[in-house]
Image (tube, rainbow, N blue to C red):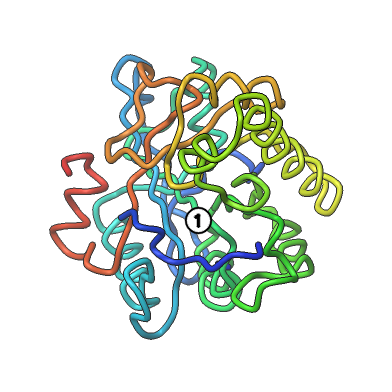
Amino acid sequence: MSRFAGSRSISRRSLLATVPAAFLLSSASGRAAEPPASPRRADALRVPILLYHRFGPSLNDEMTVTTPVFEGQLSLMRERGYRVAPLRALLAALDGTDATLERSVVLTVDDGHRTVYSDLFPLVQRYRLPVTLFIYPSAISNADYALTWAQLAEMKASGLVDVQSHTFWHPNFNIERKRLSPADYARFVHDQLARSRAILEQRLGGPVDLLAWPFGIYDEELMQAARAAGYTAAFSIERRPVTPADKIMALPRYIVVDADRGSRFDALVAGQR
């Protein structure tokens, strides 16, 4: 089961991978625990998707989770009997084709900060963690805070990391809608969605059909545009577990911060906050 980094700065932004079947949270030795004995009924499905941004030895900003805290979160999940499941396994369960997600958690990381590679990826490898990265390609091998294409390719080649779209340069669609005419806005949205998919597929291979909404901003028009651009699921930042009742183009995720530790993190993965 189980490393993170456009042309724009990745700040808090004023808001607080295709991989195989679910991996069990394992020890540092890599030995996995036994899978749960009984499947979860589809109508009882409640799986939290955790959203991270940056990692590191010290707390540099509100969106950094320090590496020791992240390791503590993994330990707590292991102690509580949770497993980290691939995002695509959760999507399959929503389709009714997989019912094995009892006590599961999904890990996602937005933006593509360089600490994904330097700090997260070693832990991904050690604990065999499936992780989905949502990337905006304008930053890659361009911004000094961001990952490089070589790093993304290495992580993807591990079989543990899926790389998906966060639009081309992470725009605020509310601002762009006010700035542009309706026709220009529609063209802008399509370009952001389609160009990101095309670049990621061309540079890294594999299907890119999942989207994380920048700033968590979405509406019916944007969801329709995403479907037209070839996306099959998209993700917001509403704080609650995913259930089969959720819209497939606006699946909720919990933003995780450094203060999410101990009983606070315990409640989060249990879907209680």
Image point (67%, 24%), residue name: 183
Q: Amino acid at mark 1?
A: Val
Q: Nearer the viewer, residue 166 or 186?
A: 186
Point out residue 8 in the picture as x, y percentages from the top left corner.
59, 65
Q: Nearer the viewer, residue 11 or 31?
A: 11
Q: Callout 1: few (<14), some (14-19), or many (20+) C-alpha neighbours within 10 Å? A: many
Q: Nearer the viewer, residue 102 or 240?
A: 240
Point out residue 189 in the picture as x, y percentages from the top left corner.
64, 34
| Number of numbered tags placed on the structure image | 1
Which structural element holds mark 1? strand
Point out residue 106 in the picture as x, y percentages from the top left corner.
44, 45
Image point (22%, 42%), residue name: 270
Furthest residue toward right: 202
Image point (38%, 21%), residue name: 246
- Which residue lies under the disc numbered 1? 109
Q: Is residue 127 above or below residue 206?
A: below
Q: Is residue 45 left or right of residue 223?
A: left
Point out residue 80 in the picture as x, y percentages from the top left corner.
24, 52
Q: Is residue 23 above or below residue 71?
A: above
Furthest residue toward left: 263
Is any part of residue 39 visible from this angle?
yes
State the image quarter where residue 118 is shown.
bottom right
Is any part of residue 3 visible from this angle?
no
Quarter of the image for the C terminus: give it: top left
